[in-house]
Image (cartoon, helix red, strand yellow):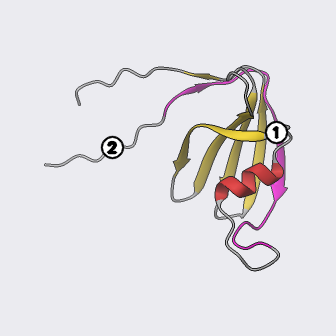
Amino acid sequence: MTRIGFILTPIALSGCYSFVHTFSFSTDINGKPISALQACLAQSHLQSPVPAGKTIETPHYTLITLQKNGEDIKAGEMCIIDKAKNTVEITAIDDLQFLPVALSGR
């Protein structure tokens, strides 16, 4: 029997606030495809944002963590793209930490 699992890295969040934007990220003004990352970078409130950590893709959502370019991961934004509603939500994070996860032998 083969088991397929999906593991998300827990992220500790404190001091959060959100901005929700309705945004079509399928094509740009010239009809070229826009990636989820480009959509997040376009809506970010950070100066010179860059992705931090891994992009998490599910059938309904894309999650991308952003931070200021050239700075340690202490504060940043979580970009949540709702693929069904075609919206981008930016959540500002005062204390961003990627926590280690111990995997059990399941």
Please state the horizontal and vertical placement of residue 6, each as a whole percent of the image: 39, 43
Number of callouts in the render? 2
Which residue in the structure is indicated by mark 1?
A: 18
Please state the horizontal and vertical placement of residue 32, each as a whole percent of the image: 71, 76
Magenta-colored segment: predominant secondary structure: loop
Please state the horizontal and vertical placement of residue 70, each as a whole percent of the image: 73, 28
Residue drawn at point x = 72 percent, y = 64 percent: 86
| Neighbours of disc 2 within 10 Å: few (<14), some (14-19), many (20+) | few
Q: Amino acid at mark 1?
A: Ser
Q: Amino acid at mark 2?
A: Gly
Q: Which residues are magenta?
A: 9-28
Instruction: Give the quadrant of residue 31.
Output: bottom right
> Considering only order in the chain, which callout, 1 or 2, is on the residue closer to the N terminus?
2
Left or right, residue 99 beside residue 46: left
Which residue in the structure is indicated by mark 2?
A: 5
Q: Residue furthest front?
A: 70
- Front position in the image: 20 or 94: 94
Instruction: Give the quadrant of residue 48.
Output: top right
Instruction: Give the quadrant of residue 102.
Output: top left
Q: How far apart are the alpha carbons under marks 2 and 1?
A: 30 Å
